[in-house]
Amino acid sequence: MDLQMYYLDPEYLNALAQRYRESYASADPFPHTVIDNFLPERILDSILEEFPQPGSIDWQRFEAAAEKKLASKSEQQMGAATRLLLYQLNSSTFISFLETLTGITGLIPDPHFEGGGLHQIEPGGYLKMHVDFSRNDRLKLDRRLNLLIYLNKDWKEEYGGHLELWDKDVTQLSKKILPLFNRCVIFNTTDFTFHGHPEPLTCPPGNTRKSLALYYYSNGRPAHETRGGQHSTLFRARPGETIDFEKPKRSPKELVKKLLPGLSRRS
C-alpha cells in the first residue's frame, strides 16, 4: 500500500475552500456544498474494495419507521485503507480546510466516530427527514458539521438514494443530491438543518448505498442555531406523510446484550 497517497494535500484543500466558501455560506436551504471528484480515485477504490458486505461484520442494524440502515463506527471492523483515510479526515490539515470553507472556527474531530464511520443502506432502506443529535455526550461538545463521502460506482438516477435537503419547517424540498462515487457533501448541522434519504432505495438486489460519514464539533455554538435544549436525532414527517417515528427495534442479539448485565446483577 502506498501510504503517501493518503496524505491530503493542504494546497489542494485550501484552493477548494477558497473556491467554495462563498457559495457554501449562501447555499439554500442552509450552508452546504457538494464537491465531485473530491479525492484521488485510487484511494476510494481501495476503500470500496475492502468495504464490508451487509453480513460480513457485526453491523448496527436500524429497523424502524424512521430509518432502515446499517452502520459501523468500530475501527476493528474497518480495513486498513479505510482507517488511514478516516484518520486523515480528522487531521489538523483537514480541520483547517473545513474551518476555511465553513467559517466555523475551533472545530474538533471525533476520534470515536460516534454515529458516523461506515454507513450502508440495502434495497428498500431509507433514512427519514431529521436533524441530527445536537451534542456528543462523550466529548461534551456541540455538533456543527457533517461530511459524507459516497462510494457508489455506476449509480443510476433510477436507483434513488438521493440525499434531500429541506427547509427549516419541512414544508419544501430545496435540493436532491445523488450519492455518486467520490462525491463529497459537507453541511452545517443545527436544529433547523433537515436532511435525509427518505425514499426507499430501489437499486438492484446485491447493490447497496455506501458512504463514509464524519462529524465535527465545537465547544459551544451560536444561539441562533438552536431551538433550545439538548436533543437526540429528531425526525419529522414530510407533507403528506403519516409516520409513527418509533424507536428502532432491537434485534434479539442486542436484547440479549442489554439483558445479560441486569440478569447477572440479580443472580
Image: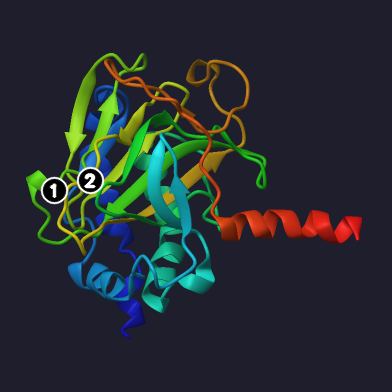
Q: Position of residue 257 (x, y in %)?
A: 67, 59
Q: Residues within 10 Å of mark 2 (few under 14, many from 20)?
A: many
Q: Position of residue 228 (x, y in %)?
A: 59, 16
Q: Is residue 244 left or right of residue 114?
A: left
- Quarter of the image for residue 131 reads top left
Query: Mark 2 and mark 1: span between their CA atoms?
Result: 6 Å
Image quadrant occupied by the N terminus:
bottom left
Q: Which residue occupies the extreme bottom position in the image?
A: 1
Q: How is the image coloured?
A: rainbow
> Tag 2's secondary structure?
loop
The residue drawn where x is 53% and y is 41% is 217
Image quadrant occupied by the C terminus:
bottom right
- Quarter of the image for residue 152 reads bottom left
Residue occupied by mark 2: 201
Q: Nearer the viewer, residue 228 or 27?
A: 228
The residue drawn where x is 33% and y is 49% is 148
> Tag 1's secondary structure?
helix
Disc 2 marks which amino acid?
Leu
Residue occupied by mark 1: 159
Residue 243 is at least partly visible in this image: yes
Q: Residues within 10 Å of mark 1 (few under 14, many from 20)?
A: some
Q: Is residue 262 left or right of residue 6?
A: right
Disc 1 marks which amino acid?
Tyr
Vertical order, 73 against 167 (above or below)? below
Kindly indicate whether the residue at mark 1 contacts the one at mark 2 (C-beta within 8 angstroms): yes
The residue drawn where x is 66% and y is 41% is 137
Vertical order, 38 against 165 (above or below)? below
Q: Is residue 252 left or right of residue 58?
A: right
The residue drawn where x is 36% and y is 65% is 54
